[in-house]
Image (cartoon, grey):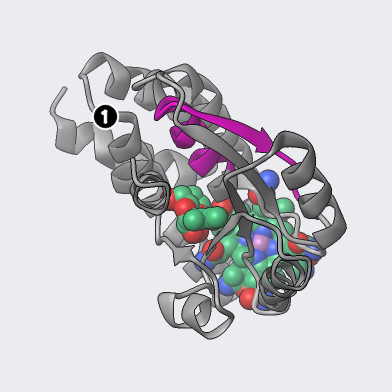
Amino acid sequence: MSNEKIFADLKKSIETWDADLAEVATKAAIEAGIPAGEIVDKGLAKGMEVIGDRFDKAEIYLPHVLGASKAMEKALEILAPTLASGDTSYRGTVVMGTVLGDIHEIGKNVCCAMLKGAGYRVFDLGPDTSVESFLEAVEKEKADVVGGSALMTTTLMVQKDLVDAVNEENVPVKTIFGGAPCTQEWADEIGADGYSENAAECVQLVNRLLGK
Ligand code: B12
């Protein structure tokens, strides 16, 4: 099977909330030697973009988005060992979570898996994480970097709350942010240390911030 066909199937599996196709296409992609980051960015995430657009236009509804998420989760479950099987020499500790009030976690999970693959110790606090929980985990795990994902315009502000709390308490940790509505401009505006558009760049960003 050609890589084009595999990418098309990966995209289609999410677009049509077809978990079985997601499983078959992800296995085919791994077998074809396609890097895990590309399987996500050039295949699965493209399907999720279509879902987002169609949901926006009210062509589909929440149960469909949920179905697409389930197909995505199936694919990520199969991909997890591949995503996490990179350079495993220890590079640093990262605390990650999705900010308070926000339950979206697919993108954050991909970032966590790729950071693990790059040799980072990653503590994933899950979705709907309060600023206090982020700070507690940073202190407990002596984290070098803390990352907050936000997928809604309404929860972006919590990223600022996290930067403010880190500054107020003088916590020696780098702050990084991402998620669809987050931008480099926003990260600069709130005084964050970094932003990345996708998971592969998230690894490069953390490497850069820690001088690795
Ligand atoms: C899937 C999805 C869901 C799923 C989530 C399942 C799950 N387990 O995560 C479900 C169905 C549960 C859901 C629920 C809701 N959703 Co929704 N959802 C989406 C959708 C379609 C895709 C998100 C996704 O998974 N993308 C795929 C991943 C791979 O991409 P990503 O998240 O962007 O992550 C990448 C980068 O951003 C970056 N990144 C991500 N996080 C981080 C963190 C750091 C530190 C860094 C450096 C990088 C980084 O790297 C990732 C990997 O490459 C988006 C549409 C969109 N445009 O995003 C809407 C969307 C985010 N949802 C939306 C809404 C409104 C909701 C609901 C409120 C709906 C409702 N009426 O109940 C609820 C949310 C309730 C809540 N309190 O959170 C809106 C938000 C609008 C807004 N206000 O801004 C969107 C934009 C849809 C829309 N067009 O209206 N949703």
Let me know if residue 126 is in the magenta part.
yes
Q: Quadrant of residue 106?
A: top right
Q: Is residue 196 above or below residue 183?
A: above
Q: Nearer the viewer, residue 162 or 2?
A: 162
Magenta part of the chain: 109-127
Q: Is residue 75 left or right of residue 6?
A: right
Q: Amino acid at mark 1?
A: Pro
| Placement of the C terminus among the 4 image quadrants | top left
- Total label count? 1
Helix, strand or loop at label 1? It is: loop
- The crowd level at tag 1 (other Cα within 10 Å; few <14, some 14-19, many 20+) is few
The residue to which callout 1 is attached is 35
Q: Position of residue 192 (x, y in %)?
A: 54, 71
Residue plotted at (26% across, 29% down) = 35
Q: Position of residue 49 (x, y in %)?
A: 44, 60
Q: Nearer the viewer, residue 94 or 84?
A: 94
Q: Quadrant of residue 157?
A: bottom right
Q: Is residue 2 left or right of residue 25?
A: left
| Residue 61 visible in the picture | no
User: Where ligand 1 lies, by quadrant?
Assistant: bottom right
Q: Nearer the viewer, residue 190 or 141?
A: 141
Q: Position of residue 188 (x, y in %)?
A: 48, 80
| Placement of the N terminus among the 4 image quadrants | top left
Residue plotted at (86% across, 57% down) = 132
Q: Position of residue 32 (x, y in %)?
A: 20, 19
Let me know if residue 33 is in the magenta part.
no
Q: Going by the picture, which residue comes out furthest to the top?
A: 31
Q: Is residue 201 above or below residue 156?
A: above
